[in-house]
């Protein structure tokens, strides 16, 4: 247990020192905290069939597979009813993909193939040509190709083994884009920047950085949106303007925050965490219950019988509480050092932080995940 606590202390202290060191000099590109509105991906989905499975496909009870196979054969002039189908090397699947921005017809994108019936595995299967539609019902790509599941599934003699998820596979570059999505980045000579984490201070610093480089061309509409007028010298060269814009460096601001994962005992503190002077008492109560069996033997020739009785003892031990006054500080490293100084374990630190927050001595947003 001591090794676990020491290891946790080292990790937490490294995080604290890193955050403290970066608090005054942390800079990043606008590209890493914001993006131009209009640059977005689109989700595609389609229904198809995977062929060539080694007896691991859908059973005859999967009606949609049999009906789909019957309809497919009709397009090739073969008429077979769904009731006559017994093909265990076919599986009905849903095909999904992300259509990135600025892709053009003829480009290839990855697709994910997921079984929707009772197929045991898609290993070795081939996806037949499957139209992929967007939310508007239009076809934007067509997928086809070999399915790779990155694992296996084998059974025999009443036992089975599998690795990863054999009912979900990936087809790299398996879909060909048939049409592009129109993207409008400029509206009436202006573009909009969307912050990944809306913040008033960060938005102000971004506008200051932009105006110092290009002149007074930007204004923050709200904490998450900045309107930028494209300079005259960049007319017809939007790519160059956005590239120069994204390379500007700023010092983003964040609220003081502590993230706690009670399941794993993980605590991550931000750089702006501060506390007021507060007294903390730390002690432990341990209860140990021992059970033993006592055997009572009768005297020889007494005619008695052996008696077995249960003897339970309860041992309660309360450790001496350590009381420490934590001074007011704005250094996250001092907060960690003070909590470690009273010998608190990760679980104890979680309870102490929650109590400090309830007492109003901890100035940070406490989030439990």
Image (cartoon, rainbow, N blue to C red):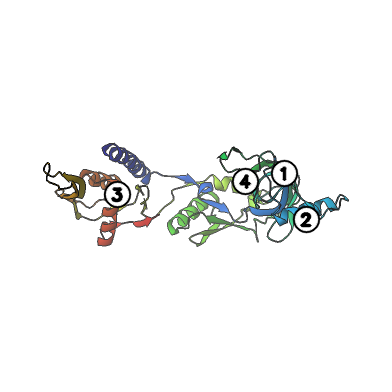
Q: Which mark is residue 167?
A: 4
Horizontal side of residue 278 vs 347, given as left or right: left
Q: Residues within 10 Å of mark 4 (few under 14, many from 20)?
A: many
Q: Quadrant of the N terminus?
A: top left
* Nearer the observer, 193 or 241: 193
**Percent x, y of residue 39:** 62, 53
Of circles 3 and 2, the one toward us is: 2
Horizontal side of residue 321 vs 198, given as left or right: left
C-alpha separation, residue under disc 3 versus residue under disc 4: 39 Å
Residue 15 lies in quadrant: top left
C-alpha separation, residue under disc 1 versus residue under disc 3: 52 Å
At x 72%, y 60%, the residue is: 137
Marks 1 and 4, the one that precedes in the sequence: 1
Horizontal side of residue 113 vs 316, given as left or right: right
Q: Secondary structure at mark 1?
A: loop
Q: Which mark is residue 83?
A: 2
At x 36%, y 44%, the residue is: 19
Give the vertical position of 184 relative to 106 (above or below): below
Q: Label 3: which residue?
A: 347
Horizontal side of residue 316 vs 39, given as left or right: left
* Nearer the observer, 220 or 314: 314
**Percent x, y of residue 50:** 72, 46
Q: Secondary structure at mark 2?
A: helix
* Nearer the observer, 231 or 340: 340
Q: Which mark is residue 22?
A: none
Q: Which mark is residue 89?
A: 1
**Residue 2 shows up from this direction:** yes
At x 76%, y 44%, the residue is: 106
C-alpha separation, residue under disc 3 versus residue under disc 2: 61 Å
**Percent x, y of residue 146:** 71, 40
Of circles 2 and 4, the one toward us is: 2
């Amino acid at each position: 247990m001591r090794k676990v606590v020491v290891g946790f202390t080292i990790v937490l202290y490294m995080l604290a020192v890193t955050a403290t060191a970066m608090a005054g000099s942390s800079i990043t590109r606008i590209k890493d905290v914001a993006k131009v509105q209009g640059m977005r991906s689109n989700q595609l989905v389609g229904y198809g069939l995977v062929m060539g499975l080694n007896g691991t496909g859908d059973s005859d009870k999967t009606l949609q597979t049999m009906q789909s196979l019957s309809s497919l054969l009709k397009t090739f002039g073969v008429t077979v009813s769904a009731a006559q189908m017994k093909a265990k090397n076919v599986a009905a699947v849903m095909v999904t993909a992300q259509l990135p921005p600025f892709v053009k017809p003829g480009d290839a994108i990855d697709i994910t193939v997921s079984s929707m019936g009772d197929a045991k595995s898609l290993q070795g299967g081939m996806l037949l040509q499957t139209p992929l539609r967007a939310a508007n019902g239009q076809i934007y790509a067509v997928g086809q190709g070999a399915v790779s599941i990155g694992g296996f599934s084998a059974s025999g003699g009443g036992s089975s083994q599998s690795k990863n998820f054999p009912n979900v596979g990936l087809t790299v570059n398996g879909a060909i884009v048939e049409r592009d999505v129109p993207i409008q980045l400029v509206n009436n000579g202006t573009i909009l920047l969307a912050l990944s984490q809306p913040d008033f201070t960060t938005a102000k610093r971004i506008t200051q950085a932009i105006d110092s480089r290009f002149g007074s061309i930007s204004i923050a509409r709200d904490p998450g949106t900045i309107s930028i007028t494209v300079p005259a010298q960049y007319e017809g060269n939007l790519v160059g303007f956005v590239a120069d814009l994204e390379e500007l460096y700023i010092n983003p601001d964040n609220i003081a925050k502590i993230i706690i994962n009670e399941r794993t005992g993980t605590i991550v503190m931000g750089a702006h965490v501060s506390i007021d002077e507060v007294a903390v008492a730390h002690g432990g109560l341990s209860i140990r219950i021992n059970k033993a069996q006592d055997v009572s033997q009768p005297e020889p020739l007494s005619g008695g019988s052996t008696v077995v009785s249960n003897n339970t003892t309860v041992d309660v031990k309360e450790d001496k509480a350590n009381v420490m006054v934590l001074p007011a500080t704005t250094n996250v490293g001092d907060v960690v050092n003070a909590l470690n100084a009273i010998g608190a374990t990760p679980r104890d630190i979680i309870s102490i932080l929650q109590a400090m927050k309830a007492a109003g001595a901890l100035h940070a947003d406490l989030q439990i995940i």
